[in-house]
Image: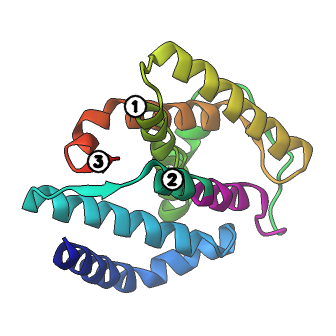
Amino acid sequence: MKKSIIQSLFYSQIAFLILLPIWMKLTVYLHPLVILVVWFSLFSLVLFCVFWVKKEKIKFSRHVLHALTFFYSIGLLILLFFRPNNQNYSDINLIPLNTILFYLSGTVDFLIAFYNLGANIGLFIPFGLYYVFLAKKPTMKQLLIITLFTISTIEGLQYITRRGSLDIDDLMLNVLGVYIGYCIYPLIQKVVVIQ
């Protein structure tokens, strides 16, 4: 197991360093903490793949799961609420798919478009997984209610505090991310064991 963790760290570091110029461009648009979030996400993905290929298990306690989720949530909140001041955060979009189609139109820098769409989905996948790991009898209806309430609150607070725009597409993409986390739980469970 130690060998697999070291291999994962090695492979993820190589990928991270090769792509570092790209990650650095994100700091113009987002809080510099984005570099740590990208590193953690890349390491987690590589770790999962290495363990999957080797048919090994990653075991940790519920306390570790709670701690990881807590620190991940703090990092995400920093990304959402502590952005550079050189941007306009007074926009409201209540028309579904308006922002998504704008990013897909090609008029926005590819990296910014890819990060906005991908991150709005990908950064919320862990919350869907976390819910399933915690719930004794997880239901999609319960998860949907919790997710809609939580993300709507975050979107509203971003708008009120002028730290982000109020966007129905962000809500849709975030909910999609949580849903994907819920759906891939059986796959993740083959590698990750919570004791």
- Residue at numbered disc 3: 193
**Disc on the earlier residue, 3 or 1:** 1
Q: Residue at x 30, y 79 (%)?
A: 9
- Residue at numbered disc 2: 63
Is 156 above or below relative to 165?
above
Mark 3 to mark 1 CA distance (whole Å): 16 Å
Which residue occupies the extreme top position in the image? 141
- Camera-nearest label, 2 or 1: 2
* Residue 69 vs residue 85, the one in the foreground: 69
Residue 1 at x, y = what percent? 18, 70
Magenta segment, principal secondary structure?
A: helix
Residue 118 at x, y = what percent? 46, 50
Q: Residue at x 46, y 48 (%)?
A: 62
- Residue at numbered disc 1: 182
What's the amino acid at mark 2?
His
Mark 3 to mark 2 CA distance (whole Å): 13 Å
What's the amino acid at mark 3?
Val
What's the amino acid at mark 1?
Tyr
